[in-house]
Structures are given as C-alpha cells and as structure tokens.
Image (tube, coloured by chain):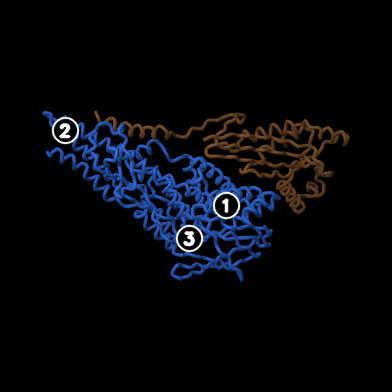
Amino acid sequence: MKFKRLISPALFAALCIICFSCARQVTRVSPEETIDISGNWNNSDSRMVADEMTKTILGASWLGDHLEKNGGKKPTVIVGLMQNKSHEHIDAETFVKDVERAFIQSQRVRLVQGGKKREELRAEKADQQENASLSTMKKFGLENGADYILQGSINSIVDAHKKQKVVYYQVDLELTDIQTNEVVWIGDKKIAKYVKN
Amino acid sequence: MNKQYFKTSKIWILPGVIFLMFGCASYHNRVASYYQKIAAGDYQAAEQDLTKNALLKKPRNKLLYLMEMGRVSQLNGEYEASNRYLNEADRLLEIGLSNAKDAVVGALVNPMNQNYKGEDFEKFMLHYYKALNYIYLHNTEDAIVEARRITLQSQEQTDKYNNRKNRYSTDAFSLMLQGLIYERDGDVNNAFIAYRNAVETYLKSDDSTYYGTPLPSSLKYDVMRMAYLNGFHSELQYFEKKFHTSYTHYTPGPGGELVLFWENGLAPIKEQEDIIFSLIKGDDGDFVFTNATGTIFIPLDRHAAGSFNLNDIHSVHIALPKYVSKLPYYTDAELKLDSSTYYFEKAEDINELAVTTLKQRFAKELGTTLTRLAVKKGAEYVLKETAKGTGKNGKDNALLEGLGFGVQLYGLLSEKADTRNWQSLPSQIAYTRVPLKPGENKLLIQLTSSDGQSHTDTIRVKGNGSLQFYSYSSLR
C-alpha cells in the first residue's frame, strides 16, 4: 500500500517511545566496583581517598617517632575540620571514618571524639551530675587530651567547554602536633575525570 | 452516501460530541473554583474544593493533585499533612511517571490524557515547600535532607540540558535556599558552596540576571560572609573584586535573624493555542507545512510522505500550550520592625521561568504534536485508501470509508494541548533578612497595589538566636 511509507516512520517513532519507556530496574553491585555515571564525586572517589590515606598514615614515620619519644605510649588523635572548598557538596565523613577505623583496628593509635559528638558527651556528663547515682556518675575534667589533630581540605578545579569537562579533585589530610603546631604527616589524593557528553 | 455510512458515522458522533463538550475546556477552567478560592485567600474552602475535584483525582493527575494538596495544606498551616503529600509527589517523580501505556496515550490521543509529569521549576519548588515545612516543624535534619535533594535535582537538571548556557539547567533560587538551610544549621562550609553555586549561576549571564531575577545583593553579601566565616580569604577577595565592594562583617544579634519569603501573585495559567498548518508548495517545489501568519515552516520529508497525493492534505489542526500571565495585584511590599524598614529583593520569577522555558522547548512540543498527528492521519488514510474499490462489485467499501471518516473526526476532536500546571505557585518570590531581638517581635508587612491601595498584616516571630524562615503569601 502506498501510504505504508507515510505511517511507518510515525509508527516507528511511537514504538521507540514505548520501548524506551521501560520500568525501573535495580541491580545490586559491589561497593568496590567503580561505576562512573555523571562525573560528580561518588563512592569510588571516597573509597580511593580512604584507601590512600589509611595506607600512608599508619605507615608514616610520625607514629614510630611518637612511640619512641614517649616510651611506647600510643598517640591520641582527634579529628578536626575538613574544609570543603570544591564546587560540590562532598561529605568528608565517608572517607574520614575509614581513616578513624584504621586507627582503631591497628591498635596503635587512640582516638577521641571531637566536634558535635564531643558536645553531646559533655551534655550527657552534665546531665549525669544531676540525675545519675554517685557511684556511676562520670566526672568532668578526665577526658583524654589529644596529641595530634587530623584536619583536611577538599579542593576542585573544573574546566569545561561546550560538551567537554575536566574535573580535578585534590583531597589533603594533615596531622599536626597540638603541642608544637608541627605538621607531622600530610597525605593527599588527586583524582581527575574527563567527562564528555 | 448509503445507509451503512450514516450508521457508521453515528457511532462516531456520540464520542465526538462528548469530546466537544468536555474536551475544549482548559485545565484551569475545570479547576477554576479551587484557584479562585486560592486567589481570594480562602485556603480552607480551597482545600475542601480540591478534595472534591474529580479531574484532579484521576490517576493521570496524581502528581498535580499531590502538589496542590501539599501547597494548600501548607497555606492552611498543616505542615505535616503538607509534607505527606509533597513527599508522595517527590516519590512519584523519583520512580518516574512515564510508562508504555502513557507513551501510547501520548502518541494516539493527546498529552492532556498522559500522566502529568511536572514542569522543571515545579520540581524545584517541591523542595522549597518541603524544606519550609520541615523548618516549621523544627525538624532540621530533614530540612537538610531537602537541601541535599536540591543538589540531586540540580544535577538531574544540568544533565537534562547538558549544562547549556541558555537553558534552565539549574535553579538559582533553590541553590540560595540550600545555602540558607545549611547556614541555619551552622554548616558554613556547605552554605558557602551553595551560595557560590547560586552566585555563579547568575554570573553566567552578561547582566547577572537569571530568568528575570537580577543577582540579589543579599546573596552577594551572604557568599562573602560565608567565605569570611570559613576563613576562605582568597575566595572573599575574589568576590569583593567581582562585586566592586569591600566586605564588612556583621554578626546577628542575640535574637537571631528572620528570612521572610514574600510569595506574590499567582503562577501563569496554561491555555490552548490552536494553530492551523497548511500544506503549501515552496519556491523550490518542495512542500512545506506553514502556519497562517507564515512564521513557521516545516518542510515535509518526501521520503516519509511517499508517493501519495499531497492534495489530500490541505490543512491540519494542532493544539499547543501557551502561558497566560496575570499581573500580581500587589506590586510592592516593605517590612517594618520597630523603627527600621526592610525591603524585599526578588529571588525567583516563576512567571518568567514558566513562559521562557515553554518557549525554549517549543520545537520539542511541536515535534511531539506532529508525530501524534502523523499517526492519526496515517490511520485515517490507510482506512480511506483501503476502502477504495474493495467493496461489493468493485465499489468503495462503505464501512472502511466510514471508519476512515470516524478516525478523521476523532483526530480532529481528540487533538488537545496539555494545559495542566501547578497554578497555586506564586508568580514571584521575594525575600528579605531581618535581625530579630530576643523574645516577641512584631513585624508589619505593608503591601501596595498598582492603584495605590495598601494592606498591612502583622507577623509575630519569637527571636531565639537562630536563623528562622517564614513565608508570607499574597496570591491575588
């Protein structure tokens, strides 16, 4: 039929719409697998930073130096501010927690709470002064003072033109001796991505 | 014409008449009573009206119903209920509203019968209202979740338009709101990033204006203040240079601050624009579809058209949506607290956004409409052509011919533009920041209309040292 040629593109278009409007599919994947979708910061970046930092921070010389200087007494570390100066909202906790876990698992570094969690602990202690029995009440002024503070920053540079984009992230972590202000360790992880639409 | 033809025609007349009766009214006309009550400020009656509206209760309008219910519940001060509706709307958008059935309806009937999928700016507004509700309910954690969801929405929007400069690839107001939510939580780092992203959205255009909204001076100050509080000195210097200003630090007093959003007027409504396209012969002998004023030309693909007689198509009727804006009754407002007066700055121009984004996707709308027309016309021609000489004794087959006319009638009557949109949104959102004193603060908001009429309302807020949000609506 001669009109077949007229309707076939239209029907083809309609079929395409139907075929591409399929239902959502969810597949579970390993958190270790690298899946890049948008080029934004993702779980793989966080994992790579955590791997790099945990690998280097425990193997660096600051730990041996401290143990030697203090007669084998383990250093106490507090986690401080992670400044995000990048173009994205990046939750630093996802990789900082891995570093903290490595400290505890290694049993060579002691960790004390900082920030909002420390405030909550002190509030709990204050509450105990009024509401807990004398024998179980925890006293103020007995906290473990940290020897070192772990601080960091996240920076990014974006270079984009038309449909191409290069995103560069640099995550820096540094450990500073609280007494002397001496920086005893610096770790960094650089990640670059090329995104083409 | 024989008896059989008339018999067949009758089958099509009834649905045709039904279409004519119910098909012509735009969405706004069919939900007019609700919107009139919203404009009159009678939100309780509006909510009751909405719950009884049969059109909005249809499954295809579920998203719109949830958004309207969320909005009117908030206007009535029912923040938990409002978020139940808005969260459900957000969930629907997340799982997607397109499916095979919906695509078929779109290709064979009209977009008005498809699932309502929401305008891009409406998706951002959903987060604005959800965040406000959470803040009113003192649920900071969930308000921050909304701030994060603004990031996800922005990424989706940026991907949709490949971050093209002249498209609505992010929403500057939502980024600013995100900054305000983070700032309220004391997260000055994320607040800085959000404000900076908002500022950069404005700075991308030559006149620092984003969809009718010039870069608010409040936002300029906020980004510098956050840079200062973070100790980002190079960033602070960068913005000082950019804005030709020198930063002076300001610390809110013990009462904290209030961010007052003034939602003014009502969003534009969608109407149907009927365009008749005629087939004409161009200068080079090729056939083109053109509208009556000759401003649109669409060449007809000869390969697609095949060898059929082009004289068969004289004109086609297509229906496209267009926005009709209504000027807000109030044109200006100021806020008084004790002896100080605070002025509002425009933060979001929904009217401009709606009209411009629809214009930007005109080609897409037209393309979808023409595809649908091609399908309808195709079916009509197949039936009519098959009818030729296939009846008894080599005559035309009356049944098929009748069906062909039926399909033609159906094609003519079923063609309809999608005139749905979230019409209880304001036309514009303006904002101001007011330092509060501890305890009760009595703020006077004075609205002025273009004819010189004024209206004053009192807003009472307790200064508690934090950053508080309040939204005041004048939807006339």
Q: Quadrant of the N terminus of chain B?
A: top left
The tag on residue B176 is 1
Q: Is residue B15 above or below residue A4?
A: below
Residue A147 in view: no
| Cα–Cα gap, marks 1 and 2 | 66 Å
Tell me where residue A28 appears, x and y as whole percent. Answer: 55, 30
Q: Chain of mark 2?
A: B
Give the mark nearest the N terminus, 2 or 3: 3
The tag on residue B264 is 3
Label 3 Cα crowd, 10 Å radius (few <14 / some 14-19 / many 20+): many
Q: Chain of mark 1?
A: B
Query: What is the drawing colour of chain B?
Result: blue
Q: Nearer the viewer, residue B288 or A132?
A: B288
| Cα–Cα gap, marks 3 and 1 | 19 Å
Q: Are marks 3 and 1 on the same chain?
A: yes
Q: Secondary structure at mark 2?
A: loop
* Three-letter amino acid code at the position of disc 2: Asn
Tell me where residue B395 appears, x and y as whole percent. Answer: 13, 31
Q: Nearer the viewer, residue A193 or B179?
A: A193
Label 2 Cα crowd, 10 Å radius (few <14 / some 14-19 / many 20+): many
Relative to B200, A154 lies left or right: right
Tell me where residue B301 appears, x and y as whole percent. Answer: 32, 35
| Cα–Cα gap, marks 2 and 3 | 61 Å
Give the mark nearest the N terminus, 3 or 1: 1
Query: What is the drawing colour of chain A?
Result: brown
Q: Are marks 2 and 3 on the same chain?
A: yes
Q: Are marks 1 and 2 on the same chain?
A: yes
* Three-letter amino acid code at the position of disc 3: Asn
Label 1 Cα crowd, 10 Å radius (few <14 / some 14-19 / many 20+): many
The residue wearing badge 2 is: B397
Q: Chain of mark 3?
A: B
Quarter-of-image position of residue B38: bottom left
